[in-house]
Image (cartoon, rainbow, N blue to C red):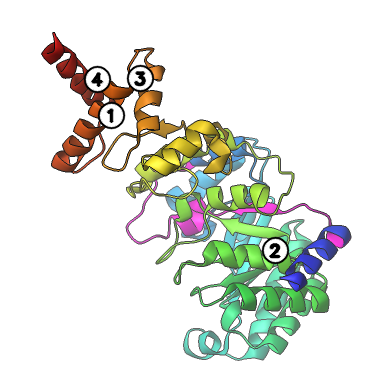
Amino acid sequence: MQWIERREHDWFEEEGSKVFLVDTTLRDGEQTAGVVFSNAEKVRIAQYLDAIGVDQIEAGIPVMGGFEKNCIKEIVGLGLNASIMAWNRAVIDDIKESIDCGVDAVAISISTSDIHIEHKLNTTRTKVLRQMRDAVSFAKDNGLYVSVNAEDASRSDMEFLVEFALVGKHAGANRLRFCDTVGTLTPLSAYRYINVLRGAVGLDIEMHTHNDFGMAGANALAGIYGGANYVGVTVNGLGERAGNASLQEMIMSLRHLMNLSIKYDTTILREVAEYVAEASGRPLPVSSPIVGSNIFAHESGIHGDGVIKNPLNYEVFKPEEVGLLRQIVIGKHSGAAAIKSKFAEYAIPITEEEVKAVLSKARHLSIEKKRSLFDKEIMMIFADMKRKED
């Protein structure tokens, strides 16, 4: 791992430790099959993202017109601290619609892989470069911040990708969005791609990763190690097919795995995740990383005892950091320490013999009910024991 550690050190020394979050819940997140946000929900989500401190919000696609365009205008009118970006094809008429919304930034997207150029766009590499250049120039002439998006970048020829990025840069693009459109990157290939591009082009790079193979977050982090300084995310990892890199996972990974000093307010992450889950009709799994209700729930005897002694034994960060609370759960795998802790929580005295008896009965009841037990059920076990003693 020496090469990664060395590269990480060089990157921090040369580029600084700032990584910018670009949230696309309102665009790519809503493109999740079957997900539709109302305009009121989109506005609320934008406000939540701004409260977290997200640097840029990709608010939607103005050329869709109607409700979509009106909603983007409303979000722009909120006066949020975040930059508001609109998504466009590399088409000047698209960009005109974005300008009409009052956004300060645009994403201009066009495919760079040969399979897309031939079978989706039915065009040539030369025409792709010309179309992208003209769109970027028009956007810059109108005072916009421009992200030039290389769709399907991870399946593109590297030499053409470098040329694409350089043409975009010379036309005035502020950054390159590297799109792993079908999620085929691995952390090693992500690092190599971005390391080469950063060195060859000298342009800000955004990682936009998809989770088709379950590696969106890992690939995004690998790209950051390679030199990317922007990362695209969605709340709860919403997005096309298997989704995008998750906002909450990325923030906490930047803070606790890459040890970056970040400004984001993480105490509302659980609240935001719950709201988006409800608005999207996609329930938040109890095991969802960072914000799932089970993340700070401890049942097994060894883990419960370790957490009671010192939470750092089995928790990397405090639950309050993401808006959760620690739970010592009583069930089939619980130990005596968990029973003692539960009774201490309610200031109810209990002897060692009573702890053993309650634990035995609790384990049997948990098996019978096929779940962990509520505190009330534990207390009923204890009360029944006391009554029999009397």
The three-letter code of the residue at mark 2 reads Ile
Task: Name the residue located 52 percent from the left edge and 43 percent from the top edge.
Answer: 314
The x and y percentages for residue 198 are: 78, 73
Mark 3: secondary structure: helix
Question: Is tag 4's residue or tag 3's residue first in the polypeptide sequence?
Answer: 3
The Cα–Cα distance between marks 3 and 1, rounded to whole angstroms, is 13 Å
Q: Quadrant of the N terminus?
A: bottom right
Magenta part of the chain: 14-42
Q: Are marks 4 and 3 in contact (CB under 8 Å)?
A: no
Between marks 2 and 3, how big is the CA–CA gap? Answer: 47 Å
Instruction: Please tell me which of labels 4 and 1 falls first in the chain.
Output: 1
Query: Callout 1 environment at 10 Å: few (<14), some (14 to 19), or many (20+)?
Result: some
The residue tagged 4 is: 379
Identify which amino acid the numbered label 3 is placed on: Phe
In this rendering, the answer to whether 380 lies above or below 12 is: above
Residue on which disc 2 sits: 224
What number of labels is visible? 4
Tell me if label 2 and label 4 are in contact, CB under 8 Å.
Answer: no
Residue 148 visible in this rendered orientation of the protein: no
Q: What secondary structure is marked by label 4? A: helix
Tag 4: amino acid:
Met
Residue furthest to the top: 390
Alpha carbon distance from label 1 to label 2: 51 Å
Residue on which disc 1 sits: 356
Q: CA distance from mark 4 to mark 3?
A: 9 Å
Mark 3 lies on residue: 343
Residue at x 35%, y 13% (from the top left corner): 349
